[in-house]
């Protein structure tokens, strides 16, 4: 078997496509992933987990958790054999890794941590408003604590802690999730789709270049840090930063630390921008909705920001205008995410041809580009393109596609959590601080509040000013 084929890149595509393939059973009326475990916002621990499909309610939350664990253990142990690692050694260590990472993920969904401050559940008087994505941060913190306080324990996990495999498989699955969402939105509102796509292309080309130059020229960061930082701020923190890191061959810790900063600051944006939009744009709700999609960088925080903003403009929860505002925010954010694959190709070419070129390459180094290009992006493009095209050709199957991808997305989120925990295990905090973590946060603050938010507002105004919230 070719050495390039027996790699984590290829294995991630195989795993991602297998999960997505199971999700497609919904097109024939079968439900092959409904047993997967969904983590909910919770006050009482018994509320934390449940099957992702109501058809499996009898399985109960603990049963769904056990089924999900068994599925991942089997698939990933087979993957370890594919990579010529010991399946038994992997399985034992992965079992402990999963338990710890999942505990962090579930803790991040506690209502006092994750609930929307404007939609607090009964009995909860306050919340940090971090959304469920706080679970990623808790996973990273948990891994960091073990990695830095108990290094021997962290070393024990080495065979199972495979962050690149986890994140790449998650991104392949994410392609299908985004493809189904994009197809759904294009069928509902072509005008909003076009405006959203045009807005993100213009915003992204401005954002990325300015953040990259600021990190390099003003703060003195290396290209290894500057490129994932620019992508994390410009697109969507977790997925974009890690895909960029793979394209330029950065160390795994670089994009994960950038992603963590994005999650933290996205929460701040979510709490501040909806109210600011209501003040600055009293008569332009669609501009405000587009602004949330362009400025707030994680999916969960962006979608929540869109809902909060719609609620400020239209207090009646049954007002259809709220739906169109939420649709606008979601459309803009989804197409920002879609741009990840395109940018991975661009950066692979630029790094191989100009920045990290080999002496023997005088022209366009196609072989070097192929070696450098993250192969899992093909899986991402395949799943996105397939689901998007299917939804456009046969709009009547979109509900079934969405049902399947919602269940598959369970595994995408779990793979992301496993990634954060695994990265934390391998990270030396002292060394990371010496590389400039404090300066990294400063770059983010200056970029976000200095121009990203305001450029996003200007572009949203350009494309959505005068568009009524009725969607016409």
Image (cartoon, rainbow, N blue to C red):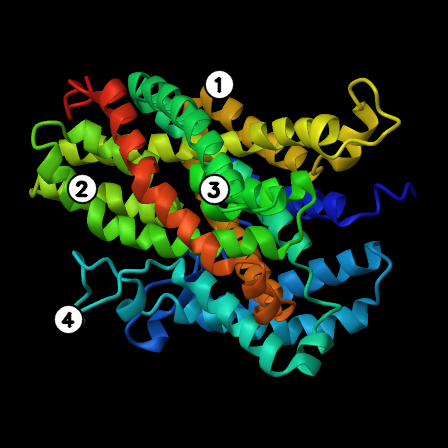
Say whether disc 1 or disc 4 marks the residue closer to the N-terminus: 4
Residue 22 in view: no
Q: Residues within 10 Å of mark 3 (few under 14, many from 20)?
A: few
Residue at 25%, 30% in the rendered image: 457
Image quadrant of residue 162? bottom right
Out of 224 and 294, give the one closest to the viewer.
224
Image quadrant of residue 423? bottom right
C-alpha span from label 1 to label 4 = 47 Å
Q: Return the residue at label 1.
A: 393
Horizontal and vertical percent for residue 258? 50, 52
Horizontal and vertical percent for residue 56? 45, 60
C-alpha span from label 4 to label 2 = 21 Å
Q: Return the residue at label 4.
A: 125
Horizontal and vertical percent for residue 171? 57, 44
C-alpha span from label 3 to label 2 = 35 Å
C-alpha span from label 3 to label 4 = 43 Å
Q: Return the residue at label 2.
A: 309
Helix, strand or loop at mark 2: helix
Q: Return the residue at label 3.
A: 218
Q: Where is 44 relative to 139, above or below? A: below
The quadrant of the image that shows the N terminus is top right
Foreground mark, 1 or 4, reads 4
Helix, strand or loop at mark 3: helix
């Amino acid at each position: 078997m070719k050495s390039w084929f027996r790699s984590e890149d290829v294995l991630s595509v195989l795993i991602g496509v297998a999960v997505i393939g199971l999700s497609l059973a919904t097109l024939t009326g079968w439900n092959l992933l409904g047993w997967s475990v969904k983590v909910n916002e919770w006050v009482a621990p018994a509320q934390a987990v449940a099957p992702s499909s109501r058809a499996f309610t009898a399985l109960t939350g603990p049963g769904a958790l056990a089924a999900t664990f068994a599925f991942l253990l089997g698939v990933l142990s087979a993957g370890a054999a594919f990579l010529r690692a010991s399946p038994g050694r992997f399985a034992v260590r992965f079992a402990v890794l999963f338990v710890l990472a999942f505990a962090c993920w579930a803790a991040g969904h506690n209502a006092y941590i994750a609930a929307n401050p404007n939609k607090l559940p009964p009995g909860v008087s306050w919340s940090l408003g971090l959304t469920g994505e706080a679970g990623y941060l808790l996973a990273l913190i948990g891994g960091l604590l073990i990695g830095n306080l108990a290094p021997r324990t962290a070393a024990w996990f080495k065979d199972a802690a495979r962050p690149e495999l986890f994140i790449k498989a998650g991104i392949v699955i994410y392609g299908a999730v985004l493809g189904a969402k994009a197809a759904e939105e294009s069928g509902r509102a072509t005008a909003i789709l076009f405006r959203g796509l045009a807005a993100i292309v213009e915003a992204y080309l401005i954002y990325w270049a300015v953040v990259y130059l600021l990190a390099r020229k003003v703060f003195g960061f290396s290209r290894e840090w500057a490129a994932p930082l620019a992508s994390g701020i410009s697109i969507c923190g977790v997925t974009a930063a890690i895909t960029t890191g793979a394209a330029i061959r950065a160390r795994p810790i670089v994009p994960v630390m950038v992603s963590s900063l994005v999650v933290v600051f996205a929460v701040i944006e979510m709490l501040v921008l909806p109210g600011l939009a209501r003040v600055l744009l009293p008569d332009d709700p669609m501009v405000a909705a587009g602004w949330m999609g362009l400025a707030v960088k994680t999916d969960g925080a962006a979608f929540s920001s869109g809902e909060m903003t719609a609620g400020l403009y239209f207090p009646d929860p049954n007002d259809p205008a709220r739906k169109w505002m939420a649709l606008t925010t979601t459309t803009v954010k989804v197409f920002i995410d879609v741009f990840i694959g395109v940018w991975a190709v661009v950066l692979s070419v630029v790094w191989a041809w100009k920045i990290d070129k080999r002496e023997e390459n005088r022209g366009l180094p196609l072989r070097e580009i192929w070696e450098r290009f993250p192969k899992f992006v093909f899986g991402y493009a395949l799943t996105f393109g397939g689901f998007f095209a299917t939804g456009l050709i046969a709009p009547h199957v979109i509900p079934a596609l969405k049902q399947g991808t919602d269940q598959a997305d369970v595994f995408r989120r779990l793979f992301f959590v496993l990634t954060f925990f695994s990265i934390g295990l391998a990270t030396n905090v002292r060394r990371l601080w010496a590389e400039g973590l404090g300066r990294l946060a400063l770059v983010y603050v200056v970029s976000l509040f200095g121009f990203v938010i305001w450029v996003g507002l200007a572009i949203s105004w350009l494309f959505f000013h005068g568009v009524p919230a009725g969607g016409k």
